[in-house]
Amino acid sequence: MSGAFFAVLNTRGNLTVGAATTGVMIDYPNASIVDRNALNADVSTLQDRAELYANLLTTPPVLADVAKHLGVPAGEISGLARVTANIPHSLFQPRSEERASQIVDSLAPYRLELESNPDLPILTIYASAPSAPGAIRLANSAVLGLRDYLRTVAQQEHFPQQDLPQVRQLGDARGGVTNKKARYTIGFLTFVTAFALMFTVLFLLLRRPRIRRPEHLPGAELRSRLTSSAAADWPRTTRILPWSVALLIGIVWLTPFDKIQLAVSAPVNITLDRIVLPFVALIWLIARASVPGARPRVRGSIVHLALGLYVACAFLSVVLDAHYINQTGDISIAIKKLPLLLSYASVFLIVASSIRPGEVPAFMKYSLGLAVLFAAEIIFEYHFKENLFNVWFSKLPSPFEFSAPTTDGLDSLGRLWIEGSSDYGVEAILMMTLVLPVAVIGVLDSKTLRRKALYGMATAILVVAMFATERKSALVVPSAAMLVLLYYRRSQLLKLSPLFLVLLVMVPVLAPGAIHGVLSQVTTPGGTHVATVSDRTADYDAIRPDLWSHLLFGRGYGSFDPATYRVLDSAILSPLVDTGVFGLLAYLSIGTSLVVFARKIARRPEDERSMVAQTAVAGGVCLLVCSTLYDLLGFPHGPYTFFYVAGLAVAGLGSRAQPAPQEPRRPRLDLTGLSRATLLAPPPPQQETVPAR
């Protein structure tokens, strides 16, 4: 009932948004540019004039003329001009004052957006209104209002009106309703959110305390109804669930899954992870419905609570501001981002509940092997300037298609664009850093020289690959993980000084110039004042209007589109704008909760789970550090890897691995001191006992 009530309440009022568009060509007053042999200078002049007229249409005098033709008050119309000149993107991103004005304008029911063609003297007018006919009238009125304003200015300046540039409308405006299903979408999302929150609250209030019983009684089977290889731990098991998890993580590490999608028409892009993950979730659900000894056990933890709070804040932010982001046209982006957040949470839930404590070390080693293959490809990409993952998976047959962005191989600072199977160099560094403690601890805990050498080689390859990305984060992120290990194993790490000397030799050999390229970005004068740094620092001031206008729950998860508003290179600012102060605190609690959950066991070197705990603490610290360096949730490889590692930590630290019980053995007889005759003598005859009367 509560879900239906809030759904009806949140869908009241007019949710229709109409849109229309028309084109305007700026032409000469006499002979048209179409009918004569125009020079490049003529086209360039008229194109600049189209850019000027686009900005004029956003000024109050022109909007007042537009309002007269439309028949509405001038205060109900706003305008926005998109810059299309060939200048760096960072120069026309809105500052705080401009962004504050845009937020006020976005509340107007009638809105105009102007965009001039960078190559032709054509101005495109986009109109938005509470209805489709209103949007069409607004687009046509914009042309009429611009003409009236030009004639008025010419009359005031005593300029001949016949010499004015001609504003030729390229056909009447065309439009329609852009959100026909908005009422159903908002209603369904509100119902699901309200129902889930009320169900959770009632479940916590009415839950009876469970009586803890020993998991394994003496003489009982360890895993009910599981026999032979099915009862064994991964990878020696025939259970499908852990193998499906291993397949999913292998796809995350070794495929550009977000660039591989089915060539079918769907509301969202059906990428490779959205094909595999539902099958893994289905296997998990089937296992949950199986016999008690085989089903995954969901044990709540502080990490579950933190992740649940952030997911709740994300859904609440969209529900509470549904009307606003529906009017601005950003609700469709939010609807697409929420399932992606649920997929991250589902990976954590599946791994934390389905992987046995005894299987966690094997999965850690498996992850290290995947990371080494990933790092080897990055080193190859650094040398030969060719991404093997893109080359291999671009040859996939139909119905799959590979959509990789075309780049010249360099970023805005002239650095090599090296990414591996991920989308960004910093993302690749985070992925490798999350498993770097497994390699370092393997060197410390290995008993044989051969195993120490293998783990040391894996450590060297990961470090070399991080520097090969030529990102300053290759110094920051691994250092944060190593400081965590230094805190817990300071005495042992001092003995690894020969390994660091080997690393200093191997990095220049395997990636020549990589260390110098990274260090020069920090040590050279002005190295910290480049665009990648100044843009990040400018973001903090630029988002103040968005923060104060939606302080507590933000403007809606995923609704702050970087392509429309501003690129936020920080996973601290993105949750703050999207989900508000509550959402930011919930997001930061994810990494913090993982540190708190694992820190006690990480301090016990005698505990066999200390390796998993120390890796978890390092992962939580890396999440917090990387959140200040780039938009972590905006690229899928990093979040998938982190929540997988967090799930392994919860699975391995939630309870101790129980050894398989064995059948009780008969006590051995002590025959010492008995003679041969005594041993071979027949047993004495048994005497019959007569019951007493």
Image (spheres, helix red, strand yellow):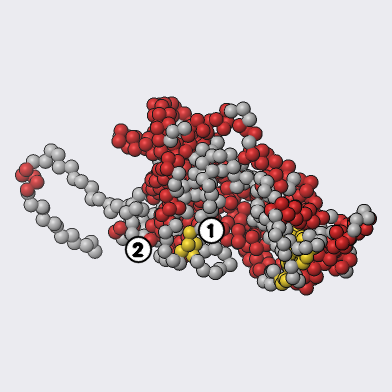
Nearer to the camera, 256 or 450 = 256
Q: In this view, does 508 lie above or below 110?
A: above
Q: Is residue 397 above or below residue 377?
A: below
Nearer to the camera, 103 or 617 = 103
- Image quarter where the C terminus lies is bottom left
Name the mark on residue 225. Answer: 2
Image x and y of residue 49, in percent: 77, 54
Q: In this view, does 252 lie above or below 372?
A: below
Image x and y of residue 597, in percent: 53, 44
Image x and y of residue 443, in percent: 38, 35
- Image quarter where the N terminus lies is bottom right
At a point 85% along the width and 59% down the height, the residue shown is 163
Q: Mark 1 points at which residue?
A: 343
Q: Residues within 10 Å of mark 2 (few under 14, many from 20)?
A: few
At a point 58% along the width and 47% down the height, the residue shown is 632
At a point 67% along the width and 62% down the height, the residue shown is 331
Residue 9 visible? The answer is: no
Q: Residues within 10 Å of mark 1 (few under 14, many from 20)?
A: some
Nearer to the camera, 466 or 509 = 509
Residue 216 visible? The answer is: yes
Q: How far apart are marks 1 and 2 (CA)?
A: 31 Å
Q: Nearer the viewer, mark 1 or mark 2?
A: 1
- 5 on left or right of 438: right
The local secondary structure at tag 1 comes to helix
Circle nearer the N terminus (1, 2) = 2
Q: Which amino acid does label 1 sit on?
A: Ser
Image x and y of residue 370, in percent: 40, 47
Q: What residue type is labelled 2?
A: Arg
- 151 on left or right of 441: right
At a point 57% along the width and 61% down the height, the residue shown is 339
